Image (spheres, rainbow, N blue to C red):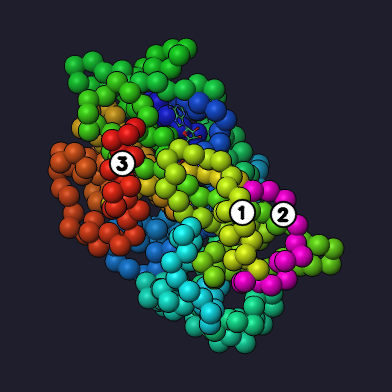
């Protein structure tokens, strides 16, 4: 089977690698460089508990499946590529501060930000409740203002730059072809069926075409209205700190004061803002100042750390907050997008689900059917509404963007 995939982020590369290993002839088309979208702008957290907890939604079930797949995925990609992806299962602390307040304009990503209390969905069998003293014993840099914390020992992180290098190498070794600087302009159809993807250089014919273009999913042309699901860009900014001489990095991911900090080798990522700004990826001084202020509120010693980097990326979100994974109303055309804040966590499960759909026509997660937005989905599950509280696109902002596109 010939497959063409648009987008070399963690989704496109993961799916491509899985399909190539199964014997498909796969091409990935990337308009810039591999990983240059949200993937390398992310915090690299594999945060199934902090983000989705133990709720019974399809999204939480998908997160748990992805979490189970991660150790094997890492072992396989490292063995095939010879690249270490710096997978660390060091756990995460979700701290509640006494003075914590809600409703900042940047709408940070703290999972325990409901009035300073831990998110009830983040509690479960593998979560421990810590006193302030216990939390500070684990992370001495935590502010004395900490009221207590949840401890999720199974959470992990990954270096997403290394992950992209590893996936590219493993994909190519498995026989896949990556074409960079190759922008997909339109999906070519014949008799209502997708027959390939056209770029300025060629028509790449395929039996199956997969759009895995992240926040830009909606930008591929040539299709009837409603064929592609609405995917909304949601901007996120991160600043990166390096320690002064003699200072040590935190050992774990720490969430609190509406932000998170992620230790990575010799640096600390502080993230992330959540903002609807269309396709704007400029670095804003307000976000920079807010992230630094919140980080010193969480860990006062960070005041003395140096800012090494600041970046912005676009998360692919959907109006109902669920991913879009599966077939579209156009025969032969598939979409893998809408992973929003969890695209790194979800990656191995996205690869598994999409390859089963394409090769075996097995649909393990019908709740994520991309056709649910145009009414042609065979089944629109009631449980979609259960996650509506997480939906980033329920307000009029989505409509404005959608019509303005
Ligand atoms: C600040 C921030 C922090 C985050 N932190 C986390 C985290 O800690 N954990 C987590 O799980 N998730 C996190 N995320 C979310 C995660 O990064 C995304 O969900 C995930 O990377 C999406 O992967 P993707 O491959 O679908 O999209 P992308 O990585 O955006 O890749 C899409 C690719 O498609 C290419 N493309 C677009 N249009 C075309 C075209 N027409 N032709 C060819 N190529 C095209 C782009 O250049 C890009 O390389 C974060 C995101 C941000 C922005």
Magenta-drawn stretch contains 307: yes
Label disc, if present, on residue 400 of the rendered structure: 3
Of circles 1 and 2, the one toward us is: 1
For the C terminus, give its image quadrant. top left
Q: Secondary structure at mark 2?
A: strand
Q: In this orientation, which residue lies closer to the viewer: 71 or 135?
A: 135
Residue on which disc 2 sits: 307
Crowding at dot 1, Cα within 10 Å, few <14 / some 14-19 / many 20+, comes out as many
Residue ID at (40%, 58%): 63
Crowding at dot 2, Cα within 10 Å, few <14 / some 14-19 / many 20+, comes out as some
Residue ID at (65%, 68%): 296
Residue ID at (26%, 18%): 189
Image coords of residue 23 (percent x, y) = 42, 30
Q: What range is drawn magenta here?
A: 297-310
Vertically, is 148 above or below 404?
below
Residue positioned most to the right: 245
Label disc, if present, on residue 288 of the rendered structure: 1
From the viewer's perspective, is 233 left or right of 312?
Answer: left
Q: In this orientation, which residue lies closer to the viewer: 353 or 342?
A: 342
Q: CA distance from mark 2 to mark 3?
A: 35 Å
Q: Which of pointers 1 and 2 lies earlier in the amino acid sequence?
A: 1
């Amino acid at each position: 089977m010939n497959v063409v995939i648009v987008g070399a982020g963690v989704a496109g590369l993961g799916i491509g690698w899985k399909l190539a290993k199964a014997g498909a002839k796969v091409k990935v088309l990337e308009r810039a460089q591999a990983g240059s979208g949200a993937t390398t702008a992310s915090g690299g957290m594999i945060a199934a508990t902090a983000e989705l907890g133990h709720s019974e939604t399809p999204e939480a079930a998908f997160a748990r499946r992805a979490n189970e797949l991660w150790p094997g995925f890492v072992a396989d990609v490292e063995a095939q590529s010879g690249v270490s992806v710096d997978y660390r299962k060091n756990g995460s602390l979700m701290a509640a501060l006494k003075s914590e307040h809600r409703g900042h304009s940047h709408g940070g990503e703290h999972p325990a930000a409901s009035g300073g209390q831990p998110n009830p969905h983040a509690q479960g069998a593998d979560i421990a409740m810590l006193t302030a003293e216990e939390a500070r014993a684990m992370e001495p840099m935590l502010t004395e203002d900490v009221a207590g914390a949840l401890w999720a020992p199974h959470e992990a992180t990954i270096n997403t730059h290394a992950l992209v290098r590893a996936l590219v190498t493993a994909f190519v070794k498995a026989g896949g072809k990556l074409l960079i600087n190759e922008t997909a302009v339109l999906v070519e159809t014949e008799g209502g069926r997708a027959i390939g993807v056209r770029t300025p250089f060629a028509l790449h014919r395929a039996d199956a075409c997969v759009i895995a273009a992240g926040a830009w999913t909606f930008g591929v042309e040539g299709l009837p209205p409603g064929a592609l699901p609405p995917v909304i860009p949601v901007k996120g900014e991160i600043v990166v700190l390096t320690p002064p001489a003699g200072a040590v990095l935190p050992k774990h991911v720490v969430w609190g004061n509406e932000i998170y900090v992620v230790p990575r080798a010799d640096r600390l990522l502080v993230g992330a803002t959540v903002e609807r700004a269309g396709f704007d990826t400029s670095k804003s001084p307000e976000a920079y100042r807010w992230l630094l202020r919140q980080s010193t509120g969480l860990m006062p010693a960070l005041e003395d750390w140096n800012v090494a980097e600041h970046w912005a990326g676009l998360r692919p979100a959907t109006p109902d907050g669920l991913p879009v994974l599966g077939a579209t109303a156009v025969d032969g055309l598939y979409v893998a997008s809408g992973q929003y804040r969890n695209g790194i966590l979800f990656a191995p499960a996205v690869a598994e689900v999409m390859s089963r759909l394409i090769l075996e026509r097995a649909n393990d997660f019908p709740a994520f059917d991309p056709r649910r937005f145009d009414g042609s989905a065979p089944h629109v599950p009631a449980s979609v509404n259960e996650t509506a509280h997480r939906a980033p696109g329920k307000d009029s902002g989505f409509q404005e963007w959608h019509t303005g596109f």
